[in-house]
Image: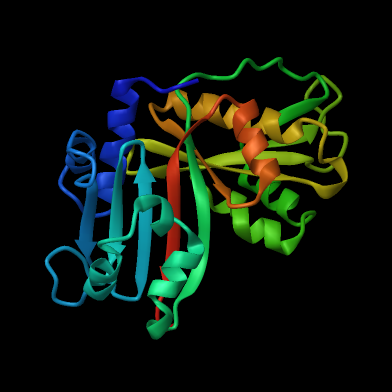
């Protein structure tokens, strides 16, 4: 479901602050004529705009975009269309002379409505960090690293329950969010491999979304390019596709 204009402005405000821009910059850029909606943030040493010349990120958000990186990259990308610049391959090509290494190309999703949740009688929701860590111990290391569940600001872990509050097994799934700029709740979901495709990830994510809304945060979902399962989950939860983020490192 599309987010309303107020929620969109909150999302744009959060990203303006994340990228070191004045409040309202991204919203104002969205109202500019086509061809003038990209904001450039130079990160070279000594620049007043930024301080890290070894990383670059290109964020597309609704009708505007931001390229955050060293000046040589801003110059090289100036005549490249947003659709093309958002490609991981384009960013690597532009940075080939600086040993560019991709950190990934992802789609950005947002929601402003809580999905309907039918509370389960077979799993309880734990808010304890120990249960999130226990779930991580049962999952592949790559998945654990990607989600970072136990390190999130708030976690909600699903633990089998007999209906009276007594655990009957190991954690099966969990979700949580990381607070960004006090405005966005960036979600992560982790499901034990042997119980995947049973709706547990969606259930845990819906709980995390509900809790994020309660804290006044706009839920954000980020799905890596080609991760159809993650994209499908975003659709299932009612997220709206809002843009993308592509990030590369240089000279590492």
Q: Nearer the viewer, residue 80 or 73?
A: 80
User: In front here: 125 or 62?
Assistant: 62
User: Residue 115 at what x, y percent from top left?
Assistant: 59, 19
Whether residue 126 is visible here, answered yes or no, is: no
Q: From what the image shows, is residue 196 above or below residue 227?
A: above
Quarter of the view holding residue 25: top left
In the image, is 167 to the left or to the right of 129?
A: right
Q: Is residue 211 above or below residue 173?
A: above
- How is colour applied across the structure in the image? rainbow
Residue in view at x 19 percent, y 46 percent: 36
**Residue 123 picture location, percent across and down:** 78, 27
> Is residue 157 something that shows in the picture?
yes
**Residue 61, picture quadrant:** top left
Q: In front here: 225 or 137? A: 225
Quadrant of the image containing the C terminus: bottom left
Q: Residue 75 in the image: state x and y as whole percent.
A: 23, 69
In percent of the image, x 33 and y 38: which residue is there?
Answer: 182
Q: Residue at x 40, y 78 (%)?
A: 250
Where does residue 107 sit, x and y in percent of width and height? 51, 45
- Residue at 82% over, 32% down: 198
Which quarter of the picture shows residue 67? bottom left
Number of numbered discs visible in the structure rendering: 0
Q: Is residue 146 above or below residue 117?
A: below
In the image, taking residue 35 as reference, residue 146 lies left or right, namely: right
């Amino acid at each position: 479901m599309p987010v309303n204009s107020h929620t969109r402005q909150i999302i744009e405000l959060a990203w303006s602050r994340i990228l070191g821009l004045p409040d309202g910059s991204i919203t104002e850029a969205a109202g500019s004529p086509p061809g003038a909606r990209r904001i450039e943030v130079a990160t070279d040493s000594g620049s007043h705009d930024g301080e890290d010349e070894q990383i670059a990120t290109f964020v597309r958000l609704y009708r505007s975009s931001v390229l955050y990186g060293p000046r040589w990259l801003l110059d090289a990308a100036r005549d490249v269309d947003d659709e093309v610049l958002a490609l991981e391959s384009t960013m690597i090509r532009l940075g080939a002379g600086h040993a560019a290494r991709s950190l990934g190309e992802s789609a950005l999703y947002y929601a402003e409505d809580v999905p309907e949740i039918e509370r389960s009688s077979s799993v309880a929701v734990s808010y304890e960090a120990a249960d999130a860590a226990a779930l991580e111990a049962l999952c592949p290391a790559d998945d654990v690293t990607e989600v970072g569940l136990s390190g999130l600001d708030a976690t909600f872990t699903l633990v089998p329950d007999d209906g009276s509050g007594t655990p009957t097994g190991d954690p099966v799934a969990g979700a949580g969010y990381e607070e960004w700029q006090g405005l966005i709740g960036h979600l992560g979901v982790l499901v034990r491999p042997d119980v995947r495709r049973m709706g547990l990830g969606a259930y845990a994510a819906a709980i995390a979304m509900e809790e994020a809304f309660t804290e006044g945060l706009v839920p954000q979902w980020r799905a890596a390019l080609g991760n159809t399962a993650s994209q499908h989950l975003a659709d299932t939860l009612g997220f709206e596709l809002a843009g993308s983020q592509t990030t590369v490192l240089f000279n590492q």
